[in-house]
Image (spheres, rainbow, N blue to C red):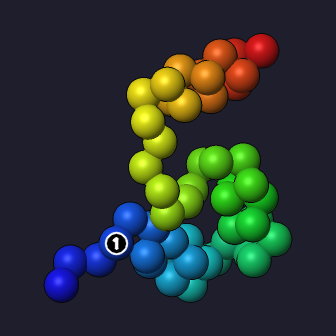
Amino acid sequence: MPPTLGEHNRAILGGMLGLSDAELDELSREGIIGTEMLMEEQLVKEKKRAAG
């Protein structure tokens, strides 16, 4: 079975690249990494929010 979206985030970003749990949690809170696909409407809102 193929991996699910974000299934290996912690293994790759934490284990291989050395990001801490706190850094990974922050990325998750900010919506930068995750396990759910964003719909187009959500992407537009996130881009506007990031642009200020």
Determine the residue positioned at 75% across, 66% down. 25
How many discs mark residues in the rendered view? 1
In the figure, 43 relative to 11: above or below? above
Q: Is residue 41 left or right of residue 52?
A: left
Q: Residue at x 70, y 24 (%)?
A: 50
Q: Is residue 26 visible?
A: yes
Residue at image position (49%, 63%) is 35
Residue 11 vs residue 31: left or right? left
Near mark 1 (Cα within 10 A), the count class, few <14, some 14-19 or many ≥20, is few
Task: Find residue 4 and report its horizontal and vertical position in percent.
Answer: 34, 72
Residue 29 horizontal/vertical position (percent): 74, 55
Label 1 sits on residue? 4
Q: Secondary structure at mark 1?
A: loop
- Check the picture and name the quadrant holding the C terminus: top right
Identify which residue, 40 or 29, lies in the foreground. 40
Q: Assign the N terminus to one quadrant of the image.
A: bottom left
Spot the residue most to the left: 1
From the top left corner, tell me how far across and down residue 8 is, in percent.
44, 77
Q: Relative to 15, is 32 above or below?
A: above
Report x, y in % for residue 22: 81, 71
The front one of 48 and 19 is 48
- As drawn, the residue found furthest toward the right would be 22
Q: Is residue 18 shown above or below 29?
A: below
Q: Residue at x 65, y 16 (%)?
A: 48
For residue 16, say whether it is visible: no
3 to the left or right of 36: left
The amino acid pointed to by label 1 is Thr
